[in-house]
């Protein structure tokens, strides 16, 4: 959407409009970065709350919350946003110029002759595409991306510079991989000839009989990674391949930067995993689960549908569906709030308890 | 191991076998993905516990735990696994096709003429090898890997796509670097002209006399990184070079994805560091130490041999050898279990304490 | 500084010197790695504290702390360091050979004809420079780096191998990007058609009325990233672009490895952010703030100037200027110390409280 007038923009956003709808809109900005526009149009101010509207200048175009009056601000035209964040989605999509890759396959890219490249695919300089790879129509592969043999990408995927797809990865349509993200590295899976210290303490919950030297033997990863449609993987995030079966992530799940997904993990649909989250091997996460930043999930854990875990929650055991959790270790959010309140008063408790003991001792002596 | 019959496979795994040992095995899978085989063989089912065995179909081949009866499941042939995870190591190694790099040096790779490349080394498209680099026999360097001047790799290393080795790194044999991992970035080391706020609070444990603006001056990293044999580094993990001496990691130590190892750190042999672990500068970690996911180790800490730290443990001070620790901050695992139990009861404690105070006050008034 | 004698080195370091100042210095090392030098000079030993000086050999050159006597150790020459870490900065800078990139633009690099490349810029093999990029004089771009259209780098920047700069990033002078670091990936910003579960629990602090399936709609990132001068970004760290306005980082701020900076974040000048720190979207951090390793900052938080947060501190709410904080959740460092002491005694408290209740009950019965 290179050139659009405010009326067309409102229709594209499915939003109500007001004023001179013929004015061209070239982009969107904060009110402080916009000003009065002439017939050639210009930037539209994003003033979806009265507190932002103070910076609006008369004669400008703006997006307002429902209920705000464009005449009060002396606007030339306006679009109304009943749910501002939702309108932001449409608006930013309309003006996103996207990744700059020329159409076709750049001559410096190295594409195996056996690869099947769909219609309208763009492959940037110095990308490397392995044997039997399939890339769906309309996908765009940026500079320095590598894709290993037998991997499959659906249609309209966008793979940013330096992203890594190993061999045997199957992805659906519209996968977005941010720079440096990695799908299909080997799982972290090792074994010792006899019971290891970790196995022992999981059994005993602490005590160890005797400690002796052992080397780690590698368990190789033969499983791949299977991704649904509409998945996004943030910059430098990593998803490991499975051991025997594939690591699996459901459609619509969005993963932020620097997130680690271990081998054999299964994640449902429409989840959000924020920055620096770690999910250890073989854990299973339901649909619509939200894990805020730095959340940790132990291995072999089951997390039900619709669970929401607040920032830095550390999850060591099963979480039932629908639960809202917080803390280290994770407990119900309400419980955590009470624990935190009590913890801050803990030093005072200690004093009060000591004093009470003294008083009771005196009472006993008296008695 | 492309084509192998079940008898040969059992011998390779040093495991007991049963049934028609001439059947060819083409790979391993979960029971649900396998079925009856004819004389041409097929996939062997991994059913190392009775709960997985329910999905076995008569006429198939399977790996069973010791004590399970292949005739009960109507199998054609079986291999017995006395320690299933250990057998997994051999089995997955047998069927891992490995990284797909053609033999020799790809013409698009840029290899400095002074580099010494061992026999049988494979270098993939668009790799960049610097001056005086040495790569040991049989090593495989994937696409988009860069290796800086004077670095040395031992034999049979596998460096996955986009991994980064800076200058002056010395690695032993069989190093595995997963995609995007980095060895030899500069340490994070800065100094202010006068005492900084951090130095001050480390001295005072909190209070600050006066706060004033200061700029950070960079301490450059002249030390390299020295790695023993059989080390693995996970996807997008990072190991910084030392300041004067090298950062050092002992043989057999395995490091998962998104792990940060600071400058001057020394790590012993046969350790496991799981995803998102951070070890700050100049800390020393003994042999056979296990740090679970998201563990943090402060700078200049010493951790003894055979320490095991549970998930998200935060280590701020010395840990004696053999200790099993957990929590934020780290305490003995048993202590942490008690603390957590008590913490969950903390809000109730607060109520009980308040009530008790009331009661005692009344008792006192009566008395 | 290839060849320098000890007198010149002392002057460069602005430090006092002693002995035969004509001896050439070729580098610096720990005392154990140095020895007696002849007229051809050699390595200078770093012995800035008496405990390191024991390993000094007679006839060698050393850097000593003020007050140490070079004659006691039989040195040939010495430099005195009133503030050893500060002298380390100058010393390591003097001997750092730097990134090995040949002058000029390597023929395998792919540079858009519209890019403006400053004087003395070095571009290594296989780098990719997009349309309208500007690179300031003296900057050095390593192998496999990509820079997207319209991005601007100042003078004397050093961009290590595999670092990623997306489109529309503006950086000042002397930016250092360690291997695999990424600036300008898209923000992690999604919206649902109706109120999402996250919005609901932020409003209710826990309880949820009803749970229903919703898909996430992407909010695109139109803002860029703006960086001041003298910024360093560690290996595999990531800075996301803003939604409408730019994500901004002030001059002199240093960021360690595997750090995540979310969209719209603003960070002031001269901050230190250590390994695995995460700062969620739209938070604002003042000047000279120090966040130790694994610190987490929630979204939309304000952190004042001169705040220092200890390792793994989790920050969920506003922090006033100058505060020293620690813990999960963050509280004043002194408070955290008391909480931790009390927590370790918590299991005992529980016992004492139970016993006290019993005693008081008995007293009541007696009464």
Image: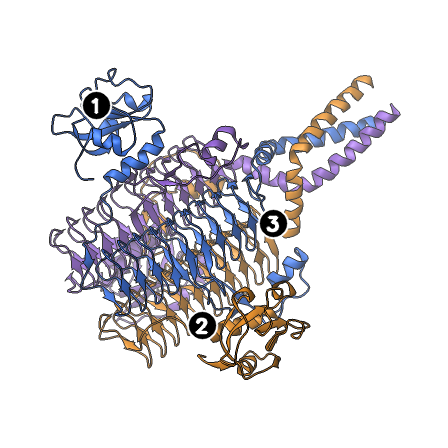
Chain colours: A blue, B orange, C purple
- Which quadrant of the rendered structure holds the C terminus of chain B? top right
Residue toward you, C186 or A327: C186
The crowding category of the residue bearing disc 3, from other C-alpha atoms within 10 Å (few below 14, some 14 to 19, many at least 20), is many
Q: Are marks 2 and 1 on the same chain?
A: no
- For label 1, the residue is A77
Q: CA distance from mark 3 to mark 1?
A: 63 Å
Examine the rendering and report whether any part of residue A26 can be seen. Answer: yes
The crowding category of the residue bearing disc 1, from other C-alpha atoms within 10 Å (few below 14, some 14 to 19, many at least 20), is many
Mark 3 or mark 1, whichever is nearer to me: 1
- For label 2, the residue is B96
At horizontal 54% and vertical 66% (from top left) the residue drawn is B30
Q: Are marks 2 and 3 on the same chain?
A: yes
Tally of numbered tags: 3
Q: Secondary structure at mark 1?
A: strand
- Disc 1 chain ID: A
Do labels 3 and 1 touch, CB within 8 Å?
A: no
Mark 2 or mark 1, whichever is nearer to me: 1
At horizontal 22% and vertical 70% (from top left) the residue drawn is B108
Mark 2 or mark 3, whichever is nearer to me: 2
Is B280 above or below relative to A60?
below
- For label 3, the residue is B331
Q: Left or right of A120: which side holds C59?
A: right
Q: Secondary structure at mark 2?
A: loop
Q: Position of residue A263 (x, y in %)?
A: 48, 59
At horizontal 35% and vertical 61% (from top left) the residue drawn is A152
- Disc 2 chain ID: B
Q: CA distance from mark 2 to mark 3?
A: 41 Å
Q: Position of residue B339 (x, y in %)?
A: 65, 43
Residue toward you, A337 or A101: A101
Is C40 above or below relative to C205?
below
- Disc 3 chain ID: B
């Amino acid at each position: 959407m290179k050139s659009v007038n405010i009326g067309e923009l409102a229709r594209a956003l499915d939003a109500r409009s007001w004023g001179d709808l013929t004015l061209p809109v070239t982009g969107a900005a904060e009110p402080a970065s916009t000003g009065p526009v002439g017939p050639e149009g210009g930037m539209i101010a994003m003033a979806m709350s009265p507190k932002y509207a103070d910076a609006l200048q008369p004669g400008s175009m703006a997006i307002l919350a429902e209920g705000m009056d464009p005449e009060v601000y002396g606007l030339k035209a306006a679009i109304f946003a009943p749910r501002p964040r939702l309108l932001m989605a449409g608006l930013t999509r309309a003006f996103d110029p996207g990744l700059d890759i020329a159409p076709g396959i750049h001559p410096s890219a190295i594409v195996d002759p056996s690869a099947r490249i769909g219609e309208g695919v763009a492959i940037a300089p110095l990308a490397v595409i392995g044997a039997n790879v399939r890339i769906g129509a309309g996908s765009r592969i940026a500079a320095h991306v590598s894709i290993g043999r037998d991997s499959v990408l659906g249609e309209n995927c966008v793979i940013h510079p330096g992203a890594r797809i190993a061999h045997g990865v199957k992805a659906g349509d519209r996968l977005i991989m941010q720079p440096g993200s990695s799908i299909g590295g080997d799982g972290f899976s090792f074994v010792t000839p006899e019971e290891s210290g970790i196995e022992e303490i999981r059994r005993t919950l602490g005590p160890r009989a005797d400690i002796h030297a052992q080397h780690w033997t590698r368990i190789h990863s033969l499983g791949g990674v299977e991704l649904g449609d509409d998945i996004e993987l943030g910059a430098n995030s990593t998803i490991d391949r499975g051991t025997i079966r594939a690591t699996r992530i459901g459609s619509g799940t969005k993963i932020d930067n620097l997130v680690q997904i271990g081998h054999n993990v299964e994640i449902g649909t429409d989840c959000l995993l924020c920055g620096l989250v770690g999910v250890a091997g073989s854990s299973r996460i339901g649909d619509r689960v939200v894990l805020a930043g730095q959340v940790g999930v132990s291995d072999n854990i089951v997390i039900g549908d619709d669970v929401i875990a607040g920032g830095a929650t550390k999850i060591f055991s099963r979480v039932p569906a629908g639960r809202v959790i917080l803390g280290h270790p994770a407990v119900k959010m309400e419980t955590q709030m009470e624990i935190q309140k009590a913890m801050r008063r803990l030093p005072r408790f200690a004093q009060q308890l000591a004093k009470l003991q003294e008083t009771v001792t005196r009472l006993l002596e008296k008695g």
